[in-house]
Amino acid sequence: MPDPILELNDIRTHFPVHEGFLFKRQTGTVRAVDGVTLKVQTGEVLGLVGESGCGKSTLARTIMQLLPVTSGSVILEGKNLTAGTTAEIRAVRRDLQMVFQDPFASLNPRLTVFAALAEPLLVHRMCPRAEITTRVAQLMTLVGLAPRDMRKYPHEFSGGQRQRIAIARALALNPKVIIADEPVSALDVSIQAQILNLLSQLTRQMHLSLVFIAHDLSVVKHISDRVAVMYLGKIVELGAAVEVIERPRHPYTRALVSAIPTPNPDIERTRQRLVLAGDPPSPLNPPAGCAFHPRCPHAQERCRAAVPPLTVLGDREVACIRAGEL
Amino acid sequence: MITPQKLPDATVTPAQLEPGHSLWGDAWRRLRQNRLAVAGSALLLVLGLLCAFGPLFSQSYQEQNLELGAVPPSAAHWLGTDTLGRDLFTRILYGGRISIMVGLVATFVALAIGVVYGAVAGFFGGKIDALMMRIVDIMYALPFTIFVILLMVFFGRNIVLLFVAIGAVEWLTMARIVRGQILSIKQMEFIEAARALGFGRRRIIFRHMLPNILGPIIVYTTLTIPAVMLLEAFLSFLGLGVQPPMSSWGVLIKDGAEKMEEFWWLLVFPGTVFSLTLFSLNFLGDGLRDALDVRTAQD
């Protein structure tokens, strides 16, 4: 296997909880991301799924160095981002870019498309000043926007077009890895496929690596090579996308997969769905042992005893001590 | 890795570009539809021009005519004269120069300090923010009049000092407003996007944050100018502001108030001009607030 381009080693992002007025005491810790280890290969699309609040977005922001990491390291092409100085991080930032969830909030309303795309080019001295207009036009064409609209403001575009602008902005710096945090969940269903196809096509064309975050398995299956399933700050299953989604091994992944609606109403009416009882536990006070055991239909006494590590099981890795027998 | 060769061919000529509609353009259109704001701006413009250029064509503001004394409005003296025979119209224009200058300079001082202070506190947050805002709270608690009297005692009466004193008090509110706005905008995704693109703090604050909170800043500024002019009038009324023979609207109103039983015009005309200015500024401020308000921006 070639060297991975992006490596996450036991990433933990915890948020202290303070209470009291004036003299604040730390009363607890939210373990939003709690020990994530992942490798992303060059040109690979890695899907990251999990329900709301499981730490997907926190993980994305930690990788991007937008949130301070509590422990662990983010390694991009052999360079440790978590240990670098501000200037070093800024230099490496070029290679690591992000597409945000809400295209209505992720673009500065006061900047034209031209200004938004030219700014990163100028700040990082990506090309001579005289060529800026051409480069912006090329970027816009690349993501399927008409260059003649470059003087327009974000509010003059539709949601899908705005997300294209955001993608163009992320591509402006020639990144090697793009983190896309639910890039289609704020868009109309009819537009989602267009943006997914664009991302998938750009990844191949530019030989990019993509970490694609979503809470919708059908979307992830469409675009990813591999899938990582997250539950309460930890990865519970990791493997080839088709394998994980068609033959899930972890009980939580099974429940997720069973929630995908089937297009055929006859099958949909009769098929058995696994419905999980209760809500996900609070990351402020996670259950002992396997975090999933209070909702797991297969839980046993020993599931409470210890946190199951992510272990290799055939073609994938699963964090469940009963995965082999089920 | 993308090399420029991998990017699709695309060239544009400026003629092909479609013009965009900026939020500022939309706000400007809405402002022009607000009749009170337009009338206010027109009146301010006329008053400003009169104060700036009017005195060039008339007699000096300190030219006395003791034999004439106080005369009511007439053809020779449109707004009458004061007890020393000085033309009131000319004195109002001269006073306007001082009052408007105090208003603008002190507001600019307040704006400059308040915006930077508030932006820094809001951007860095945490302990820095807490410390900076407690300082503001303490300054708020100082009684303004005593503060100014102390300044005057230590440094002597000086018109520059007046600007500084007023500016030093008015920036507090601006700092609070800017801090609050920065705190709320800091959470927006486009600020995270700017950080992810590796932009420096200064660029993020001044290019991405401040332009997006200019609305509240502009509105508060137009509302600060009349407040500052009132303060100057108040200080002059107490005898702490502008000294004779110079005049300001505050001084004129004070003099007029002392003599209003015999010479009504000495109070009525400066008072009217001052009130009209304050009304105009407030209408303009309200108009700007409505025009820049994002909630009304939908239509």
Image (cartoon, rainbow, N blue to C red):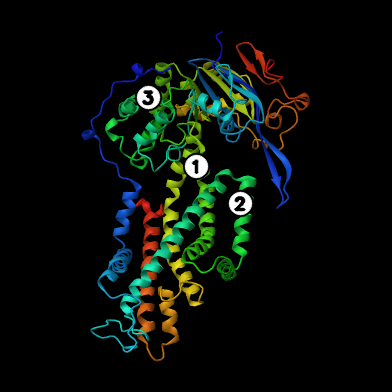
Q: Secondary structure at mark 3?
A: loop
Q: Residue at x 32, y 56 (%)?
A: B30
Q: Which residue is mark 1?
A: B188
Identify residue type, mark 3. Cys
In this picture, residue A319 sits left or right of residue B258: right
Instruction: Write down the chain letter for disc 1.
Output: B
Residue at the extreme top of the image, as rendered: A1
Q: Nearer the viewer, residue A15 or B79?
A: B79
Identify residue type, mark 1. Met
Q: Residue at x 63, y 32 (%)?
A: A276
Comparing marks 1 and 2, which lies closer to the viewer? 2
Q: Which residue is mark 2?
A: B132
The image position of residue B12, as x and y in percent, is: 25, 29
Q: Secondary structure at mark 2?
A: helix
Q: Residue at x 55, y 65 (%)?
A: B155
Instruction: Give me the C-alpha separation between circle 3 and circle 1.
Output: 29 Å
In this picture, residue A252 sits left or right of residue B84: right
Do we see residue B23 in this rendering? Answer: yes
Q: Kindly check if marks 3 and 1 are in contact, taking CB atoms under 8 A apart as contact.
A: no
The image position of residue A254, as x and y in percent, is: 60, 24
Q: Nearer the viewer, residue A15 or B10?
A: B10
Comparing marks 3 and 1, which lies closer to the viewer? 3
Do we see residue A212 in this rendering? Answer: no
- Please tell me in which quadrant of the rendered image residue B250 appears: bottom left
Count every numbered label the image shows and give the total. Answer: 3
Q: Which residue is mark 3?
A: A127
Q: Kindly check if marks 1 and 2 are in contact, taking CB atoms under 8 A apart as contact.
A: no
